[in-house]
Image (tube, rainbow, N blue to C red):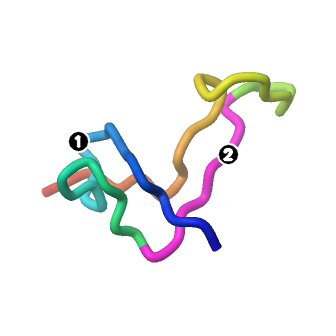
Amino acid sequence: MSQVSRCQVEECMYNKNMECHAEEIEVLSSTTNRSVSQSANTMCETFAPKG
């Protein structure tokens, strides 16, 4: 399985020094028709806020 080499979501509890440290991630489509043609149309479902 590939590793996430970079994450720019500083508010996520799994982000340490711009690297994702979650054991697994789930990435979903953020569009209503589920058709994705660019990274802006995706979202990380694993996100958990720091705190």
Q: Amino acid at mark 2?
A: Leu
Q: Which residue is mark 2?
A: 28
Q: Which residue is mark 1?
A: 10
- Classify residue 8 as left or right of residue 27: left
Q: Residues within 10 Å of mark 1 (few under 14, many from 20)?
A: some
Q: Position of residue 32 (x, y in %)?
A: 78, 26
Residue range in magenta is 23-30
Q: Is residue 7 magenta?
A: no
Q: Secondary structure at mark 2?
A: strand
Q: Amino acid at mark 1?
A: Glu
- Classify residue 17 as left or right of residue 20: left
Which SS does the magenta portion mostly show?
loop
Q: Secondary structure at mark 1?
A: loop
| Quadrant assignment for the N terminus | bottom right
Choose between 34 and 37: the one closer to the eye: 37
Tag on residue 20?
A: none
Name the residue rendered at 43%, 54% in the picture. 5
Q: Is residue 24 magenta?
A: yes
Give the mark nearer the N terminus: 1 vs 2. 1
